[in-house]
Amino acid sequence: MKPVREQGAKPPFSYPVRVGHVSANPVTVHLEAGPTEREGLAQLWKITAVHALKSEMQIARWKKDGVRIKGHVEAEIEQACVVTLEPVSSKIQETFEQVFVPEGSKLARMVLSDSAEMVLDPEGPDAPETFTGDTIDAGEVVAEAVALAIDPYPRKPGVGFTDHVEDDPTEEAAPPSPFAALKDWKKND
């Protein structure tokens, strides 16, 4: 579930990186969301609360003009149970890696086979993201990693749908006869 925010709106968790200042040697960055940022992320993700979010990442040059951001994120969130609406706490720990290349770069082109079909390896790395201008937002990369790990249907442990029964397993399910609707019809003389 990738969150969608309004065009031009400032992201709730942001860490801009100037592409021109990124070197070939990885730079380690530690990020931690403050109270206002956590509140904004909770609204963006449509959950009850974000209690903690911190990340450690390495930012380095990738090939000639790209940037690689890879790291680890930990978050503590609270959602409403889909059965009882009671609070459900979750801990998220995810690793992420994203490569960015400038718009129009040869590295951003999709690989095509001889028959002009896109070649995608589901187990392979993601295709590079493109960026415009001279800045990449590493905070959005972290927020996206957490958003994709959020359980869309959180449930409190031991809680289930008890009042809803689909079938009674004791009854033998016989298919209805196609003539069952006609049995009550009588011929009028």
Image (tube, helix red, strand yellow):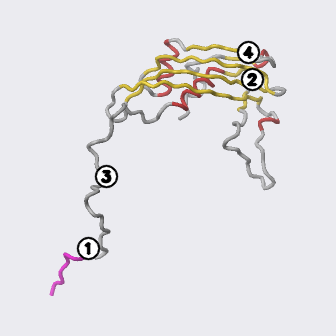
Label 4, on which residue?
A: 27
Q: Which mark is residue 180?
A: 1
Q: Compute the Cα span from label 4 to label 3.
A: 56 Å
Identify the residue shown where x is 81% and y is 33%: 105
Which label sits in the foreground, 1 or 4?
Answer: 4
Q: Nearer the viewer, mark 3 or mark 1?
A: 3
Q: Which residues make up the magenta segment?
A: 180-189
* Residue at the spot of label 2: 133
Read off the residue under disc 3. Answer: 166
Question: Which residue is pictured at 77% across the width and 36% down the height?
Answer: 108
Label 3's element? loop
Q: Callout 2 environment at 10 Å: few (<14), some (14 to 19), or many (20+)?
A: few
CA neighbours of label 1 inside 10 A, class few (<14), some (14 to 19), many (20+): few
Mark sitting earlier along the chain (4/3)? 4
189 horizontally vs 138: left or right: left
* Relative horizontal placement of residue 170, taking residue 130 as reference (left or right): left
SS class, disc 2: loop
- Give the residue type at disc 1: Ala
- The residue type indicated by label 4 comes to Val
Disc 4 to disc 2, how far (Cα)?
21 Å
Q: Is residue 18 above or below residue 68?
A: above
